Amino acid sequence: MPARALTRAVVRFGGLLRRQSLPITPRQVLDAVRALDHLDVLDREEVRLGLRATFVTRPEEAAVFDRAFDAFWRARTEADEVAEALAGPAVPEDGGGPELESQGAARERLALEGWGEMEQEDGDDPLSVPAASEAEAMAARDFSTFSAEQLDDVLRLTVKIAKRLARRVSRRRRPVRRRGRVDLRRTLRANLTRGEIIELRYRRRKRRKVRLVLLCDVSGSMDLYSRFLLQFLFALQHVFARVETFTFSVHLTRVTDHLHARSYREVLKRLQDVRDWSGGTKIGESLAEFNRRWPHLVDRRTIVIVLSDGWDTGDPDVLATELLRIKRRAGRVIWLNPLLGNPSYEPLTRGMAAALPLVDHFAAAHNLAALRDLADRLHL
Amino acid sequence: MREEIRKIQSLMEAAEYVTDAPVATSVHLALSLKKPLLIEGHAGVGKTEVAKVMARVLETNLIRLQCYEGLDAAAALYEWNYQKQLLHIKLHEGAARALDQEEHEIFSEPFLLKRPLLQAITQERAPVLLVDEVDRADEEFEAFMLEIFSDWQVTIPEIGTVKATHPPHVILTSNRTRELSDALRRRCLYLWVDYPTFDKEVAIVERKVPGIDGRLAREISRFMESLRRVRLAKVPGVAETLDWAQALAGLHADHLDETIVTETLGCVLKDADDIRRFHAEVAKGGLTPFLQVP
């Protein structure tokens, strides 16, 4: 065992990393202490590499680790002060400072602050869920027509529906035409007493879960619909092998890790931090960024869902090229456009016109009924 | 630097692997803490190579479990040799033998097909177990593997429990086609392997392509470094560098020019869009920008 002081320092360092929101387990701290036994503790670089191997579990964390390490081991005696100092600026309170916010942005911000209020609660007061007929009426209404007070109810209903769907989807068995492969292990067992293979046992190929990649437009009016879609799919998520979520307006942001937070309230609170407040939507650029940085998330077992009204201020050719890239690799591409819920709407915007030929399924997702229909499309 | 780490580094160098401090430190800790080492990185940066070299350095067997979608316990652990069992039953049909004796016989070790995980725990000397591209396997399989890693024993109902006397050294590699579970990540030491620096890549080329012209090796490495900065769909790794260096050495080239790069571009770029993009860049400014220090 390394010297006591050193052990304590490592434990404190683990605490510091935790405050930097690296999910450090006691086990990892123990390993780190053990690792010091096998390292030259006077060689700072070696200690850094060794501790990094035990504390860091994904590449994104390496930069956080290095920063924390430099701060911590520079002045170990003042470690706690350093930790305080680090924790402060690491979590910015305001995106770009209030003076940068336009009036419109301030309004959006207010709307977003409400996101935190719709945490799903199981075993919630049953009276707060509308009665069946009322629910049906609610299901057909466009999300944007609800008042702020009603939205809470609608959200709770969304979660209810999603959970019911989740149960149904996971129980459903698709009929198989062929009987599958002969399962030799069980066949032999079953026929052991007969000396002859009389009865064959079959094995069905395991049905694999589908992965989802969500690309949600969060600019202006799309924000509300994105909230509902996210909430809906969040409640459905265990039906899928994995749900990867991105939001975009001008830039693309990966929010999957934010969605792994313990409660949805927390999640939506955190999403506020990743919003960019400038106007305009660059769908093509955002998809390009997705293709460049996360191409490995899309394969034949993946359904890619884009939620956007197609008002693209960028180049429609870029949108078409990048969407084609996705389509080539994905199992299916679904485009959700809430405007489609309006009977007089025609997808004539340049962006939408460019995207439409490349989309496998084009739907509205503007109300609960539409979300329910969507759930039926989410298998390959 | 700790003596052991330096030793590992020099042993790896001797085994034709150009290494650096992060790799050597991680391997050293994996060996001394007896923990699995999870190596992530882009395709073609030499993740698998670490395990191969480790086996060579430790003078032990390398057992490889290649993961794929749908890989299950039977394919990874063990399976009974059914054909052989059936034949055996047929051959002894006439002899009136007790059922339990028959059963005991065909469910014994000669009828057992050991798959990589079982092989790994039944070795005389601790082998290196390479679980390659673990991100391709399903999440269920990940959980199954964690179970094996935790106590290194396997229970075969017909035979009993097999416990490893020499637990293997485990290397897992992942290309990040899927995020691995946190449980697996925390159980392992972690190493991210990035594209090599210019100096390291030159060293790799000179080591792996003996007799290559020194200037050419530097030009190739510089070119690759620049190329990785262009926004490509399939960024070439070290494997591509080496293929290309081999090809150029085979053509007796001693420097890069537009003609020879165009002729051999297939070694490096393997996506139609990327090739188009590269040609557009070259049409704009020629090859020179690719050969300059950024």
Image (cartoon, rainbow, N blue to C red):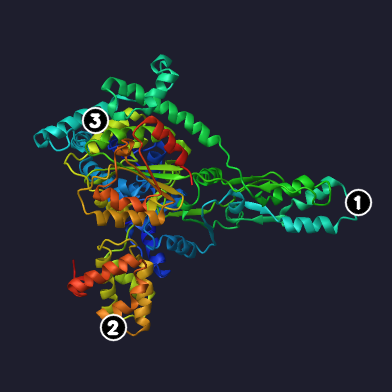
- The amino acid pointed to by label 3 is Leu
* CB atoms of marks 2 and 3 within 8 Å: no
Dividing the picture into quarters, in which one does residue A86 lie?
top left
- Chain letter behind tag 2: B
Which type of secondary structure does the marked residue at label 3 adopt? helix
Q: Secondary structure at mark 1?
A: loop
The amino acid sitting under disc 1 is Ala
Q: Amino acid at mark 2?
A: Asp
Q: Alpha carbon of mark 1 to alpha carbon of mark 2: how far?
A: 78 Å
Between discs 1 and 2, the one toward the N terminus: 1
The percent coordinates of residue A304 (x first, y second) are: 38, 47
Q: Which residue corresponds to mark 2? A: B254
Residue located beneath label 1 in the image: B96
Between residues A75 and A270, which one lies in front from this camera angle? A270
Query: Residue sitting at 44 percent across and 61 percent down?
Result: B48
Q: Kindly report which numbered mark, 1 or 3, lies closer to the viewer in this rendering.
A: 3
- Image depth: mark 2 or mark 3 in front: 3
Residue most extreme to the bottom: B252
Asked if residue A109 is positioned above or below residue B293 in the image, the reply reads above
| Mark number displayed over residue A112 | 3
**Above-or-below relation of A269 to A57:** above
Q: Assess disc 2: are there few (<14), some (14-19) or many (≥20) residues with their C-alpha within 10 Å of its C-alpha.
A: some
Please state the chain letter of the residue tagged with numbered disc 1 in the rendered image. B
